[in-house]
Image (cartoon, rainbow, N blue to C red):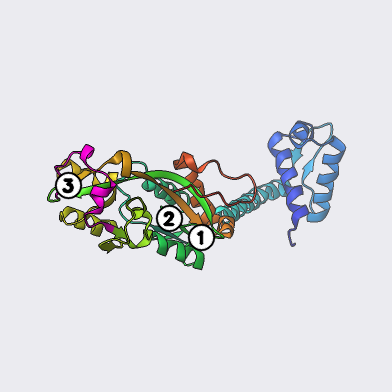
C-alpha cells in the first residue's frame, strides 16, 4: 500500500493515542474531540484493512495487528523525521565559494581584527571554499566591479560608482623619516611644509597625489605599490613618506624611524568593505558581511530588508 501524507498524519494520531493510553487521554495532546479521534482511527483501519484496537467500556486495548502497526509506524515516522531534518540542514548549510580581497600589512593594526571575522565565518560556513587575495586598493576596486572577487576590505583611494561601502575602522597615517635622514634629529618645531618640500618624498601608486597634496609638489621622487617597499625607502634615509602608525611602530621603537609633525601631516584613512549591492543577496556574502558587522561596531546592524549602499567615509 503506497503511503501518502494523510496516512502519515493518521499514523501520528494513532501513535499518540497508544502512547497516551487511550482516546480520552490523548485528547489534550491532539487537541481533538473524542468523535474526531474515533473517526480518524476508523479511517486508518479502513485504509490499512485491519482492526487496530478495542475501545469502549472495557477500555483501550491494542489488537495484535495494532501492536505491529504501531511498531512499524514508529520506525516509519522516525525515518521521516530524520529525512526532514537532513533536508532542512541541507537548506540551511552554506556551500560554494567566497573570494575576499585585502590590502597588505594590516595584521599589526589592533583596530583590524579580521581574524575574528574569518574564525566566525569558518564556524558558520565550514563547507565554503574561502579564497583570500592581497592586492593594492585600486586593483581591489577594479576586481570587485568586474565581479572577480565578492568583497574587498581596504582604504580606497576613490569612490567607485555602483558599489556599496560598509564602514569598518580608521587607520592613522603619519609622515616618517629614517634615522639616517637629515631631518631625523631636527625638532618638530623647526619643520614645516617648506622644510619637507626640499627633500625627496615617496608616493604610493594607488593613491595618486593624495599623500602629497599638502606639500604642493609636482610629483614624488619615488613611487611604490606596497607598504613594505615604502618602509624600505624611508628606512634608507633617502626619502620621506607616509606609513600606518601600527606598521611603523616597531621601527619607531627601535629608533629607526620617527614621525614628523603629526599635528600637521597625520591623517585618518577609513577602511571599508566594498561590494556590489547584488552580492548581499547571496547567502555566503551576506553571512560574511554579518560577521563583519558583529566585529566592527562602525558597520552598524544588519539591514532589516534589502541592502542599500552606504555613503563612503570622507577621506
Q: Is residue 193 a member of the stretch shown in magenta?
A: yes
Residue 28 against residue 212 in the figure, above or below = above
Q: Label 3 to label 2, Cα distance in Å?
A: 30 Å
Q: Nearer the viewer, residue 21 or 146?
A: 146
**Visible residue check, residue 243:** yes
Q: Determine the residue positioned at 20% across, 58% down.
A: 233
Report how many numbered discs are placed on residues in the image: 3
- Position of 71 with respect to 276 (left or right) is right
Mark 3 and mark 2 in contact? Answer it, CB < 8 Å.
no
Q: Label 3 to label 1, Cα distance in Å?
A: 38 Å
**Residue 156, which numbered label?**
2
* Mark 2: secondary structure: loop
Q: Residue 88 location, x and y as percent?
A: 60, 53
Q: Label 2 to label 1, Cα distance in Å?
A: 9 Å
Between circles 3 and 1, the one closer to the viewer is 3
Mark 2 and mark 1 in contact? Answer it, CB < 8 Å.
yes
Q: Is residue 196 a member of the stretch shown in magenta?
A: yes
Residue 42 against residue 205 in the figure, above or below = above
Q: Determine the residue positioned at 25% across, 62% down.
A: 221
Q: Residue 123 location, x and y as percent?
A: 44, 48
* Mark 1: secondary structure: loop
- Sequence-first tag of 3 and 2: 2
Q: Circle 1 sits on which residue?
A: 160
Q: Which residues are magenta?
A: 182-202
- Sequence-first tag of 3 and 1: 1
Q: Split into 4 quadrants, where in the image is the N terminus?
A: bottom right
Q: Residue 30 location, x and y as percent?
A: 76, 37
Q: What crowding class fits label 3: few (fewer than 14 Cα within 10 Å), some (14-19), or many (20 or more)?
A: many
Q: Determine the residue positioned at 77% across, 43% down.
A: 53
Q: Circle 3 sits on which residue?
A: 183
Amino acid at each position: 500500500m503506497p503511503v501518502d501524507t494523510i496516512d502519515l498524519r493518521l499514523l501520528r494520531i494513532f501513535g499518540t493515542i497508544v502512547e497516551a493510553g487511550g482516546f480520552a487521554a490523548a485528547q489534550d495532546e491532539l487537541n481533538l474531540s473524542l468523535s474526531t479521534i474515533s473517526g480518524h482511527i476508523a479511517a486508518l483501519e479502513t485504509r490499512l484493512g485491519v482492526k487496530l484496537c478495542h475501545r469502549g467500556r472495557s477500555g483501550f486495548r491494542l489488537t495484535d495487528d495494532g501492536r505491529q502497526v504501531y511498531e512499524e509506524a514508529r520506525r516509519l515516522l522516525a525515518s521521516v523525521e530524520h529525512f526532514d531534518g537532513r533536508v532542512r540542514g541541507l537548506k540551511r548549510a552554506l556551500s560554494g565559494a567566497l573570494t575576499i580581497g585585502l590590502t597588505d600589512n594590516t595584521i599589526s593594526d589592533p583596530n583590524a581584527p579580521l581574524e575574528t571575522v574569518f574564525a566566525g565565518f569558518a564556524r558558520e560556513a565550514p563547507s565554503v571554499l574561502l579564497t583570500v587575495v592581497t592586492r593594492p586598493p585600486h586593483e581591489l576596486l577594479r576586481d570587485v566591479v568586474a565581479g572577480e572577487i565578492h568583497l574587498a576590505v581596504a582604504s580606497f583611494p576613490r569612490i567607485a560608482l555602483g558599489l556599496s561601502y560598509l564602514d569598518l575602522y580608521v587607520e592613522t597615517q603619519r609622515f616618517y623619516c629614517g634615522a639616517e635622514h637629515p631631518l631625523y634629529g631636527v625638532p618638530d618645531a623647526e619643520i614645516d611644509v617648506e622644510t619637507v618640500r626640499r627633500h625627496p618624498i615617496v608616493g604610493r601608486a594607488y593613491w595618486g597625489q593624495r599623500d602629497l597634496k599638502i606639500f604642493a609638489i609636482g610629483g614624488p621622487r619615488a613611487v611604490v605599490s606596497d607598504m613594505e617597499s615604502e618602509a624600505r625607502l624611508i628606512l634608507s634615509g633617502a626619502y620621506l613618506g607616509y606609513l600606518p602608525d601600527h606598521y611603523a611602530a616597531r621601527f619607531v621603537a627601535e629608533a629607526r624611524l620617527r614621525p614628523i609633525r603629526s599635528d600637521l601631516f597625520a591623517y585618518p584613512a577609513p577602511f571599508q568593505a566594498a561590494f556590489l549591492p547584488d552580492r548581499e543577496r547571496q547567502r555566503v556574502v551576506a553571512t560574511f558581511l554579518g560577521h563583519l558587522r558583529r566585529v566592527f561596531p562602525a558597520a552598524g546592524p544588519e539591514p532589516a530588508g534589502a541592502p542599500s549602499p552606504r555613503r563612503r567615509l570622507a577621506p
